[in-house]
Amino acid sequence: MLPEFDQLVTAALALSPDERGKLAERLLASLEDEEDLEDSGSVERAWIDEVKRRQERFRRGEIREVPADEALARVRAGLRSA
């Protein structure tokens, strides 16, 4: 690790518990923001691809539509049995 990193850690540990908590929150938020930016495109692309696959399977008659109340009943039943 870089000496600057060690100095930063030492300085951070010298902060009050409240200040360390605030610092930790900001650091975690910065990681989440970066992950969101990196992941949002790939997640969105994956969902678009999945929708296209499902549409194509529906058009070919491989799957059928399910009424919303039936789909929700299936989900609820699955949650109860889990």
Image (cartoon, helix red, strand yellow):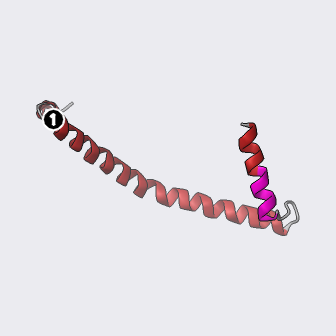
**With respect to residue 58, does 15 lie above or below?**
above
- Place residue 64 in its image quadrant: bottom right
- Residue at image point 87% right, 60% down: 62
The magenta region covers 67-74
**Image coordinates for residue 81, horizontal then vertical, percent:** 76, 38
- Residue at image point 75% right, 44% down: 78
**Image coordinates for residue 32, horizontal then vertical, percent:** 37, 50
What secondary structure prevails in the magenta region?
Answer: helix
> Is 48 on the left or on the right of 67, as rendered?
left
> Is 34 on the left or on the right of 82, as rendered?
left
Residue at the disc numbered 1: 12
Tell me the SS state at disc 1: helix
> Is 12 on the left or on the right of 70, as rendered?
left
Q: Can you say which quadrant of the picture contains the N terminus? A: top left
**With respect to residue 28, does 14 lie above or below?**
above
Category of crowding for the residue at label 1, using alpha-carbon neighbours closer than 10 angstroms: few (below 14), some (14–19), many (at least 20): some
